[in-house]
Image (cartoon, rainbow, N blue to C red):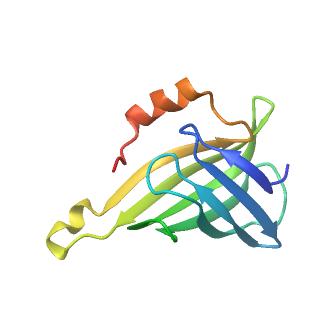
Amino acid sequence: MNINGVWYNELGSKVIIKASGQMLTGTYQSAVGGQGVFQMTGMVDPVQAAGQTFGMVVVWNNSTSDLQSTTAWCGQLQMINGQETLTTMWLLNQTTNPADNWESMLIGQDVFTRNAPPGTTAKKAMKKHPYKR
């Protein structure tokens, strides 16, 4: 198994990952918020084994969008039902004023595979997604 390449989550968001040793670089296109491509960076355990762990971060700011937020995913590359899968938990922190800090953090789960979900599947998943702008 290899973490390099194109991955899609259940919403249709797309991440392109390139590993070099422990370092991850790439891009992220969100199906949830923001327009365009966002830079992604992270780290991965360089030992390619079942359950290879990694973390990646996206700051939601590019030439067309500034969402004043950052998301970090932490997870592992696994073989599930014969399919390479990135199982992750994410934390999204968005800018708030100090009185509203209690609502600045969201937490969730994403499962990425090499295959983009069909449009109807992504639409159903989007209805359940906690982060809507």
Q: Where is residue 6 in the image (x, y as percent from the top left)?
A: 74, 50
Q: Position of residue 50 (x, y in %)?
A: 80, 48
Residue at position x 77%, y 73% in the image: 22
Q: Position of residue 16 (x, y in %)?
A: 71, 56
Q: In this view, does 110 lie above or below 52?
A: above
Residue, far top = 120
Q: Nearer the viewer, residue 57 or 62?
A: 62
What is the total number of numbered labels drawn onto the structure image? 0
Q: Which of 105 and 32 is in front in this view?
A: 32
Q: In screen coordinates, is 59 left or right of 8? A: left
Residue at position x 83%, y 73% in the image: 21
Q: Is residue 56 above or below residue 32?
A: below
Residue at position x 46%, y 27% in the image: 124
Q: In this view, does 79 lie above or below 1?
A: above
Q: In this view, does 59 lie above or below 75?
A: below
Q: In screen coordinates, is 29 left or right of 123? A: right
Residue at position x 71%, y 69% in the image: 25
Q: In screen coordinates, is 42 left or right of 95? A: right
Residue, far left = 99
